[in-house]
Amino acid sequence: MKTLAALALSLALLPACASSTAGDYFVNRGGDLVDIVRLHVAFGKAASAKVEATRMLHLGIGWEDEVWAWGLANREVGRWQESIFTWGLILGHHDERMIKGIDNNRLTGSYGWTFGKGGGNVFEVSDRDNWLDLLTLRATLMLGIGADAELRVGEAIDFLCGIFQFDPSGDDKAYSQMKKIEPAPAAAEKPKAG
C-alpha cells in the first residue's frame, strides 16, 4: 500500500518536475499549505467570544477597536491594526471595518448574513472568486488580549487538489513568468591604446 501511495505521488509530481516551471509548482504548494491556518494574537480595546462553522453559521459576539494584532495572515507573519464587529446566533455576520498594515489591508474580509440590504436578506462572501473560503472553522476569544484562529478546510482541499495540479481556489501564480529586474548593461570598454 505504501508503494502504491509513493507511486501515485511520484506520478502527480512528474509533470511539475519535468517542466521549466517546477519552482512555481513547489512555491504554490507551499503557499497553499500556509493558507490552511490563520492565527493571530491581539491586544487593545476588544471583547469577543465567538465560534464559526463555515462562514454562514456563527455563535457569539465580538468587538475590536483599533487593536494591535500579530500573527500569520495572508501567507506571511506580520503586525497590523484591526477594527472588527462580529455577531452570530446561528446566522451571523463578520464586519472587518478596518485593517491597516498587511497586504491589501484585508485579513479575511467581511462576510455573512446582512439583513434589510436592498430590501431583503443577503449572504455576503468575503472572496467571490474562491467559494472554498466558505469552508472555514473559526474561534475568537478576547478581553483586552486574546487570540483568533481559523482552520480553513477549503484551503486544505485546494492544497490536496494542487498536488495533482488543480487549483480550485484560483490562487496559484506563475512566479517564473513574473517580470524580473534586468541587470544594468555593462559599460562599454574603451579601446586600449596601442
Image: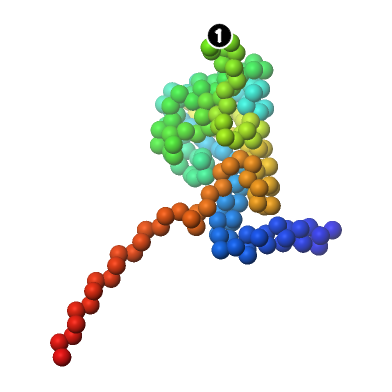
Residue 194 is situated, as x and y percent measured from the top left of the image, at: 15, 91
Front residue of 143 and 50? 50
* Residue under the image location 19 percent in, 79 percent down: 190
Is residue 101 shown above or below 140?
A: below
Which amino acid does the dot numbered 1 rest on? Gly
Viewer-side residue, 77 vs 142: 77
Q: Residue 136, position in %: x, y?
A: 64, 33
Q: Is residue 53 above or below residue 160?
A: above
Query: In this picture, is 16 found above or below 158?
Result: below
User: In the picture, which quadrant includes the N terminus?
Assistant: bottom right
Q: Residue 163 location in percent, x, y? A: 67, 52
Q: Residue furthest left?
A: 193
Residue at 36% x, 61% y is 182
Q: Quadrant of residue 12?
A: bottom right
- For the point 59% across and 55% down, which residue is it? 25
Q: Is residue 163 left or right of residue 85?
A: right
